Amino acid sequence: MYKKLGKFSKVIFVALVIGSVCALGFVPQICQAANYAYGPYTGMWGVTGDGNLAAGVGDGNHVTGNDNIAVGKHSGDHVDGAYTIDNTGTAVFVPESNDIAAGDHVGNHVHGSNNVALGNESGNHVSGGYVLDGSGVAWRAPGDGNIASGNGSGNDVAGSLNVASGNGSGNSVNGGYLFAADGVTPVVSSYNNDPRPVAGVGNIASGNGSGNVVSGNGNMALGSYSGNNVAGNNNIAMGNNSGNGQFTINSDGTVSVDPTTQTPLTANNTIAIGNSALAVSNDDIAIGHNAFAWGDPAVAIGSGSSATGHDSVAIGTNANSYGYNSVALGANSSDGGRPNTVSVGSPGNERTISNVANGVFGTDAANMNQLRRVSHGLTGGIAAAAAQMNVMPYVPGVFAVALDGASYDGQGAFGATISRWDCGGRWNLNAGVSYGFSNTPIFRGGVTVLLGPLPAK
């Protein structure tokens, strides 16, 4: 393989071998008290420290520290340390070490240690943001352990342990911005009045164009053009174009993704999984292609689903819940914006809920078996009431008995009534009983008094 390499490539190959040997600690005697430079305008100016390696054109100049590697054109320049604040509030300079830059225009203006940049135009302007000393003066802090792999990735990063994998990924990443001791006044650059960033830690972007313009910690973007324009912590975006802070909420609770908007996604602990999925408020979950959760919190699961009401849940393809504390279940279901509602369909898309147990308590749902029993009881009761004779012959001093039957809405009943007028014809005692075939018996009793004069004989 070595014979197939060109002259310049052989130089780079040798440099990488030497750098790898030094970085891994093999044969340490060749890596101590010496800096290595291969190529024109490489490692010529402002290099201090030991074990630094530069191979290419214009690489490895203005380097402060030890065991740094720069391979390519115009890479690994202006690599130095930064400042930490000791327990007395004093800024203390810390030299950098073990930074690796491979590619053209890679790993320039890096302030920290153990940073890796692989790919053209990657890993530039990396630091740990800024910190205040005891007098309120801002100092550049070291950014350590950042990894950028891909052309144009991992640039303008303030923080540590951030990972960018993919072309154009992981750029403009920080942990927010620095304020004075009063917590209100922003600390800005004396050069251009730009706000000073603070360190963002543990942000991961994997996919072309992912994880750009991120201000926070522990955010993860997996998928092309995912997790962009995010200001928050511990957010997860998985899927192409997912977890981006670019959207508009429509009046019916649905959402439109608008790539022209610049409103950042300001939330914590969100999960967006699926192409173009988006979770906007704290603790929101959106799973599925174009799934959208905006309520605080809310859950949307299913392709095209949206949950925009607070504490709302939408499950199913194109399910939509935008009522407070409401649930939409099933494809194309909607709660219509009604609060405290569970919907299993929408106008024209109604559903049957089956296998419902008998309701027990007052707020339980009743099933059709219970409703039929109620209906049968009512119709049987009506039939039983109709089966009682209420009009009896007027014959003083004689008992009269009547037997009757009746039917109502398919329910049958029979009854019996007994009546007797007193011998004077003024008082009537009567009683009746009837029974519907699907109901308990009905008992009736009554007294009749004539208020007027007796009829003429």
Image: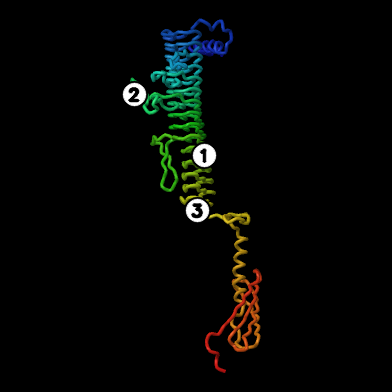
Pick out the residue farthest to the bottom.
Answer: 457
Q: Is residue 427 visible?
A: yes
User: Where in the figure is residue 273, as x and y percent of width and height?
Assistant: 52, 37
The secondary structure type at the circle numbered 2 is loop
Compare residues 188 and 420 and report the one nearer the observer: 420
Direction from residue 225 to residue 445 in the image, left or right: right
Residue picked out by circle 1:
285
Mark drawn on residue 111: none
Front one among 349 and 409 = 409
The residue tagged 3 is: 346
Question: Looking at the picture, does residue 29 appear above or below residue 356?
Answer: above
Q: Amino acid at mark 1?
A: Ile
Density class for disc 3 (Cα within 10 Å; few <14, some 14-19, many ≥20) is some
**Type of amino acid under label 2:** Asn
Circle nearer the viewer, 2 or 1? 2
Residue located 44% across and 23% down the image:
158
